[in-house]
Image (spheres, rainbow, N blue to C red):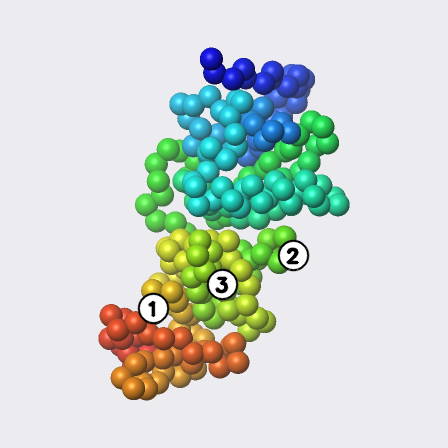
Amino acid sequence: MPPARPPAPSFSGSFEYRLQRTAVGVVMLDLARRITAVNAVAGRLLRLKGTDPIGADILAFHPPASRAKVRWLIDAAENATDGTAGMVVTTPMGSLVAKVTTLGDQGFCMMFHALGELPMGDAEPAERPHLLKLPVLRGGATELVEIADVVCLTAQGHYAEALTRAGTHLCPLALAELEKRVDPLTFVRVHRRHLVNLRHVRAAERVDGRWTLALSAGQGARIPVGRDRVELVRRLLAV
């Protein structure tokens, strides 16, 4: 026999009306992190069409690579002194800014809004708009860095490390996702692990038959150029 569905919360009619009409995606969770209410915007962002999410674990509606981040986000809100936490998560519709607020013994309220312009229908975006700012994690919060200030992006598992003049920061997006969202005339995948902003390349050098790029940040950091990318890099930098 399947487990019994938790009883629906006793929201007032006015609350339900406001919930369904807010422009931000809202999901209400019980203490077991099962969905008790969801508005139409969240349903589209999480692609819930054709499913009945009430009583389901919220993690079931996120890609496997994103579930650890969503779990961490809820844990962070539960343990935070102010009961809130926020970060960027990846969904089938693209990247979303998510914020979780604890509601005491009533559970949690999770709110989403799109990072950039994403379609609200069922189709995948043919081409996502370029990022104007890069989300990075600092002290459990998500901050936004000007994309022009990013010197290099380096793969770190399911995440990326962003090098700027101010230092290095963890970005919650994968390098493959970032490559789709940055200007290809400025950011070039020079190596399988590195996406470099050519505006911040200080010098190109060939040593022992291998090319490297010296960057304007990271105390003269040098990035290797993959053998299959050498001709492209040389053409773009005229070296």
The amino acid type found where label 2 is placed reads Gly
The numbered disc on residue 161 is 3
List x then y, in percent, for residue 73.
59, 44
How far apart marks 2 and 3 lie (CA) works out to 15 Å
Does the CB distance between marks 1 and 3 fall below 8 Å?
Answer: no
The numbered disc on residue 65 is none
Q: Secondary structure at mark 1?
A: strand
List x then y, in percent, for residue 213.
38, 79
Q: Nearer the viewer, residue 14 or 196?
A: 196
List x then y, in percent, for residue 119.
41, 39
- Sequence-first tag of 1 and 2: 2
Q: Secondary structure at mark 2?
A: loop
Q: Which residue is at 53% across, 70% downward?
A: 164
Where does the C terminus fall, quadrant-wise?
bottom left
**Identity of the residue furthest to the top in this view:** 1
How far apart marks 1 and 3 lie (CA) works out to 14 Å
Rendered position, 74 above or below 203: above
Rendered position, 202 above or below 85: below
Residue 184 visible in the picture: yes
Q: In which quadrant of the rendered view does residue 205 lie?
A: bottom left
Does the CB distance between marks 1 and 2 fall below 8 Å?
Answer: no
Q: Secondary structure at mark 3?
A: strand
Classify mark 2: residues with Cα within 10 Å, few (<14), some (14-19) or many (20+). few
**Identity of the residue furthest to the front in this view:** 1
Look at mark 2 in the image and give the residue it sits on: 139
Q: In which quadrant of the rendered view does residue 204 lie?
A: bottom left
Q: Which residue is at 52% across, 29% downward?
A: 57
Look at mark 1 in the image and give the residue it sits on: 191
